[in-house]
Image (cartoon, helix red, strand yellow):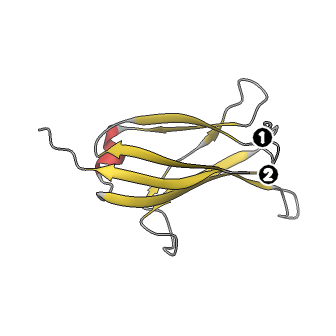
């Protein structure tokens, strides 16, 4: 089950968070050997990301942990307003039919930077 959340960001602010891939009962799913993908779009119907989140599976221990780290430079170009995001953990099988878990999804509320 994905975690549905809203993230508040200020343009130019750095951001980091760990998201957890969980099952229907809330327990962590072992995503060892998986990769992650995810990004921000201004609306769900758009093709391509406004910003690629470059999520990475945390391999320091076995869990459902996926890390996202954004620099201030990366967030400085985001449009002020409400955007959408999602993060998936996926395992690519030899026939391309691997498992995909929705780790997190929701909204990103971007506020303008007012400092010089």
Question: Which residue is rendered at x = 79% and y = 28% of the image?
Answer: 62
Give above or below for 41 relative to 26: below
At which x and y percent is residue 57? 67, 38
Question: Which residue is rendered at x = 58% and y = 54% of the image?
Answer: 105
Residue 54 left/right relative to 96: left
Count up the numbered dots: 2
Residue at the front extreme of this rendering: 25
Question: Which residue is rendered at x = 71% and y = 24% of the image?
Answer: 60
At which x and y percent is residue 95? 88, 64
Query: Where does the C terminus fall, quadrant-wise?
Result: top left
At which x and y percent is residue 28? 78, 36
Residue 72 left/right relative to 89: left
Which residue is more in the foreground, 25 or 88?
25
Residue 3 left/right relative to 63: left
Q: Which mark is residue 72?
A: none
In the rendered image, which residue does mark 2 sit on?
91
Q: Select label 1 or label 2 by which is in front.
A: 1
In the rendered image, which residue does mark 1 sit on?
26
């Amino acid at each position: 089950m994905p975690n549905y959340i809203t993230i508040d960001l200020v343009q130019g602010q750095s951001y980091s968070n760990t998201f957890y891939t969980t099952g229907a009962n809330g327990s962590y799913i072992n995503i060892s050997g998986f990769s992650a993908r995810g990004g921000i779009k201004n609306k769900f119907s758009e093709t391509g990301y406004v910003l690629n989140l470059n999520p990475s599976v945390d391999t320091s221990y076995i869990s459902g942990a996926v890390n996202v780290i954004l620099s201030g430079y990366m967030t400085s170009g985001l449009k002020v307003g409400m955007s959408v995001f999602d993060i998936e953990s996926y395992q690519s099988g030899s026939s391309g039919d691997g498992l995909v878990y929705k780790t997190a999804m929701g909204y990103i509320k971007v506020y303008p930077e007012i400092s010089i």
